[in-house]
Image (cartoon, helix red, strand yellow):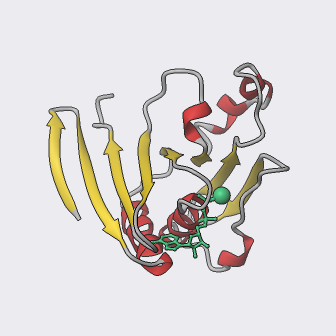
Amino acid sequence: MRAKRTSPAGRTLTAVTRSEKETLELARDLARGFRGREVVLLIGELGAGKTTFVKGIALGLGLKDLRQVCSPSFTILNIYQARFPVFHFDLYRLEKEGDILDLGWEDYLDRGVVVVEWGEKVPFEISAVRAFIAKGEGDERRFTIEIPGSNS
Ligand code: ADP
Ligand code: MG
């Protein structure tokens, strides 16, 4: 993993993984430093590894049974009880920008770690970790992870 400072306020990590396990470990290591109120927006096409990344986050937050973690593409929200509550959103089926407001989404922000698949559909400004995932050849996945500073 490589880290570079992009501004005094935050940093950007880049990483390449070559298996599902490596993606799991990347997300696990990131989440080990979480304090319980982070928002993580995951941005990448179908099959990029967003749900795998959420599994890794849940693992890093101490969730024992990772079988609970799956894309809530019909239910929109899954909740896991790890060291902190994990609110796992999947906005794939969200059609209009306003629909996310109907979810009462902001109620979750100060109650635990919020992780969002199809995070580019969140229509408002928010301080969040943004993980961009690009598919490469075969099992290769390229991650660009923007982490905001504590003052943002
Ligand atoms: P998404 O939620 O973005 O649709 P998933 O995490 O559900 O993606 O699925 C990713 C798929 O890609 C899985 O079938 C997984 O086994 C496969 N895969 C292959 N290589 C990787 C990798 N490096 N990281 C994550 N998943 C990978
Ligand atoms: Mg998914």
Residue in the picture at 65% in, 76% down: 66
Q: Is residue 112 visible?
A: no
Q: Which image quadrant for residue 80? A: bottom right
Instruction: Residue 56: give x, y in percent of width and height.
Output: 51, 69
In the image, residue 115 lies at what x, y percent? 58, 49
Looking at the image, is 82 positioned above or below residue 119? below
Q: Name the residue: 59% across, 37% down.
A: 109
Question: Toward which corner of the image does residue 108 lie, by quadrant?
Answer: top right
- In the displayed structure, 76 sits above or below 15; it is above
Q: Position of residue 133 (x, y in %)?
A: 44, 53
**Residue 71 x %, y %:** 72, 59
Quick one: quadrant of the C terminus? Answer: top left
Residue 49 seen from this side: yes
Q: Is residue 17 above or below residue 148?
A: below
The quadrant of the picture occupied by the N terminus is: bottom left
Dividing the picture into quadrants, the one containing residue 26 is bottom left
Q: Residue furthest toward the right?
A: 74
Residue shown at the point (40%, 68%) measured from the top left: 137
Kindly give the residue lying farthest to the front in the view shown: 137
Residue 100 placement, left or right of 112: right
Q: Nearer the viewer, residue 122 or 18?
A: 18
- Quadrant for ligand 1 reads bottom right
**Count of numbered circles on the image:** 0
The residue under the point 62% across, 79% down is 64
